[in-house]
């Protein structure tokens, strides 16, 4: 079964005319990577915020998992080692979700502004903050792409502008906006290469008759843009893998939600997804292995290093 391909072209980034040491090369590579990515294949008639609203409950449960705690611990330990985390500092958490980082940062004495565009995610975050008795957290229900730092009083306001695994930082403009809001530190965590998600990849081949495109987010673009722009970013990369077990119904619903972003989920597609899960479930439980590589970048927006091109 093959449905209509939304964008079958596979083109390499066309950055001719720019050196690898020129930030314009990485600006264009990032834009081209996004244009040919999974993100760009999303249906224009759907609001992606609705998708994140449907995932709020699942994200709230994931926040309690041991593997989530390990990732949070790794990130915060690295920031502590870099001398970033200080009591009383002001933090902007972009794409805060259900509060995986907002809550532990606030526990450490930071004043956190949590920006999250999905109301259901934000409601879960507010519930968690209230349960912890944290009083130094503010909430902004906004899309980062639409924020105007100068007009909204956010420019130069934060000691740390923090963004982890958020689709909000997806190009140079949204990256530069982070620096506009920061008076010192910026932190970005994103995927580093293809994520291993067997069910989505196999079902994509069945439904669309092609390999699933790469995601539009890859830490290679912001890191190299910052480096070639003259900043001095610190960088750390690691691999995470885990098994996730779900009741069959929840696994089917999650896959339907995912594919609904890219095509109409017809009765035939529903049957294909249900059959895929049913064949692999044991005693009504579906299990899948995931594997991702993640990278995190820390930098300051201070004086730039002079590059070989002479640009500063």
Image: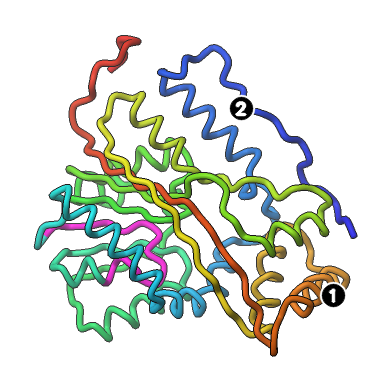
Image coordinates of residue 25 in percent, x first then y, are 49, 22
Q: Residue at x 31, y 41 (%)?
A: 235
Q: Which mark is residue 92?
A: none
Query: Looking at the image, is 197 positioned above or below residue 194?
Result: below
Q: Quadrant of the C terminus?
A: top left
Per the model, the C-alpha gap separating discs 1 and 2 is 37 Å
Indicate left or right for 261 with 127 as reference.
right
Q: Residue at x 59, y 61 (%)?
A: 48
Q: Dot 2 corresponds to which residue?
A: 13
Image coordinates of residue 268 in percent, x first then y, are 88, 70
Indicate left or right for 251 with 206 as reference.
left
Indicate left or right for 152 with 54 as reference.
left
Q: Work out whether mark 1 precedes mark 2 in sequence or the reverse, and give the earlier one.
A: 2
Quick one: label 1, few (<14), some, or many (20+) residues within 10 Å? few
Q: Can residue 148 be seen at all in this image of the molecule?
A: no
SS for dot 1:
helix
Q: Dot 1 corresponds to which residue?
A: 271
Can residue 251 be found in the magenta stretch? Answer: no
Query: Is mark 1 in CB contact (under 8 Å) with mark 2?
Result: no
Residues in magenta, as a range: 89-103
Camera-side residue of 246 and 147? 246
Task: Locate residue 54: give its quadrant.
Answer: bottom right
Q: Residue at x 31, y 47 (%)?
A: 149
SS for dot 2:
loop
Query: Looking at the image, is 142 positioned above or below residue 274?
Result: above
Q: Can residue 273 be seen at all in this image of the molecule?
A: yes
Task: Locate residue 298: give its quadrant.
Answer: top left
Can residue 97 be found in the magenta stretch? Answer: yes
Camera-side residue of 115 and 283? 283
């Amino acid at each position: 079964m093959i449905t209509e391909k939304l964008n079958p072209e596979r083109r390499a980034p066309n950055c001719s005319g720019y050196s690898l040491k020129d930030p314009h090369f990485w600006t264009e590579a990032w834009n081209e990577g996004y244009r040919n990515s999974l993100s760009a294949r999303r249906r224009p008639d759907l609001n992606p915020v609705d998708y994140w609203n449907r995932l709020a409950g699942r994200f709230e449960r994931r926040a309690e998992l041991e593997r989530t705690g390990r990732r949070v611990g790794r990130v915060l330990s690295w920031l502590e080692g870099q001398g970033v985390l200080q009591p009383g500092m002001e933090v902007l958490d972009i794409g805060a979700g259900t509060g995986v980082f907002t809550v532990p940062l606030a526990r450490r004495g930071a004043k956190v502004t949590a920006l999250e565009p999905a109301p259901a995610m934000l409601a879960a975050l507010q519930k968690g903050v209230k349960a912890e008795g944290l009083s130094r957290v503010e909430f902004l229900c906004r899309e980062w792409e639409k924020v105007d730092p100068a007009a909204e009083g956010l420019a130069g306001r934060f000691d740390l502008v923090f963004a982890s695994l958020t689709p909000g930082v997806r190009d140079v403009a949204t990256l530069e906006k982070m620096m506009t809001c920061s008076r010192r530190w910026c932190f970005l965590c994103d995927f580093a290469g293809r994520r291993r998600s067997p069910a989505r990849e196999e079902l994509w081949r069945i439904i669309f008759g092609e390999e699933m495109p790469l995601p539009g987010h890859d830490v290679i673009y912001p890191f190299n843009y910052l480096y070639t722009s003259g900043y001095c970013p610190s960088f750390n990369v690691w691999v995470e893998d885990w098994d996730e077990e779900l009741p069959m119904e929840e696994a089917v619903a999650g896959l339907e939600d995912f594919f609904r972003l890219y095509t109409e989920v017809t009765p035939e597609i529903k049957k294909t997804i249900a059959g895929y899960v049913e064949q692999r479930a044991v005693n009504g439980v579906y299990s899948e292995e995931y594997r991702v590589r993640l990278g995190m970048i820390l930098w300051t927006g201070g004086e730039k290093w002079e590059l070989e091109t002479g640009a500063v």
